[in-house]
Image (cartoon, helix red, strand yellow):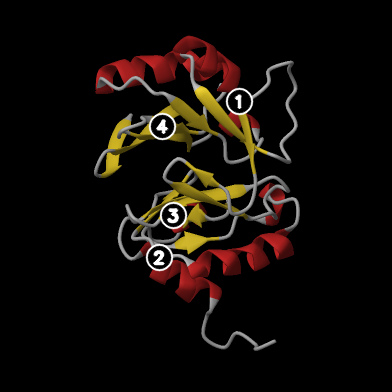
Amino acid sequence: MIDECAPDVYDLTVAEMNDARYRLFVFDGDVPTLVDSGFEHTVDIVVDALDELGIEPERLVITHGDGDHIGGLEGLADHYGLETWVPEQTGLDSSYTPDHRYGDGDEVGDFTAVHTPGHAEDHHVLIDEQAGVAVLGDAVFGADARGLPEGYFVLPTGFYSADLNTADASLERLLEYSFDVGLVYHGSSVTTAASSKLDAFVNFDGKPSE
């Protein structure tokens, strides 16, 4: 399944298991870019979808080291000769060496990287304010992933979080940025007023002041 979720931004489903979609995002532009790589066994699915789109990527950026985000890194990098970017905290289970390691505040192409630990220690959000798009990774899920109406955000459950309190606190860091589209990997992405909706989620009515 391929959905255009913003101009020249594509949501590419690589697998569906247990009623859940697993995906990566494709940004078509001066330097066509993949954000995350799917599983090791879904590389051919990604290649076929990119052929269908007529896009040959040149860069791959990983948000964090979970298997559904990093598993296809080496296979896709080898297939396309990609320039690869991996968070500085992410461990690799193979001898593959990424071209670049990045950290909080670094510029990765058109994105600014924001370290948002909690779901995982190495987790980063990637924000392109000029385009109004943020790849939120697993910092949040789409609300419909938890049986709520789509168009809003929820936190991943504790089951999917290394430290749920840290994951919650990390969202404060994203409020410094403005973006209309917030892309998530589980549930539906938010495609209107995303940063405002995230602000409302973080600064909920009745939230105690520190």
Q: Give x and y (percent) for residue 70.
A: 60, 29
Nearer to us: label 1 or label 2: 1
Q: Which residue is mark 3?
A: 144
Separation of marks 3 and 1 at Cα, in angstroms: 36 Å
- Asked if disc 1 and disc 2 are in contact, CB closer than 8 Å, the reply is no
Q: Which residue is mark 4?
A: 33
Nearer to us: label 3 or label 4: 4
- For marks 1 and 2 on the same chain, the one whose residue lies earlier in the sequence: 1
Say the numbered circle drawn on residue 32.
none
- For marks 4 and 1 on the same chain, the one whose residue lies earlier in the sequence: 4
Q: Is residue 16 visible?
A: no
Callout 2: SS:
loop
Q: Quadrant of the C terminus?
A: bottom right
Q: Mark 2: few, some, or many residues within 10 Å (few <14, many ≥20)?
A: some
| Residue drawn at 36 percent across, 31 percent down | 31
Q: Which residue is mark 2?
A: 178
Separation of marks 2 and 4 at Cα, in angstroms: 21 Å
Nearer to us: label 3 or label 2: 2
Quadrant in which residue 139 is drawn: bottom right
- For marks 3 and 1 on the same chain, the one whose residue lies earlier in the sequence: 1
Q: Mark 3: few, some, or many residues within 10 Å (few <14, many ≥20)?
A: some
Amino acid at dot 1: Asp
Amino acid at dot 4: Thr
Picture layout, residue 143 above or below residue 95: below
Q: Which residue is mark 1?
A: 99
Callout 3: SS:
helix
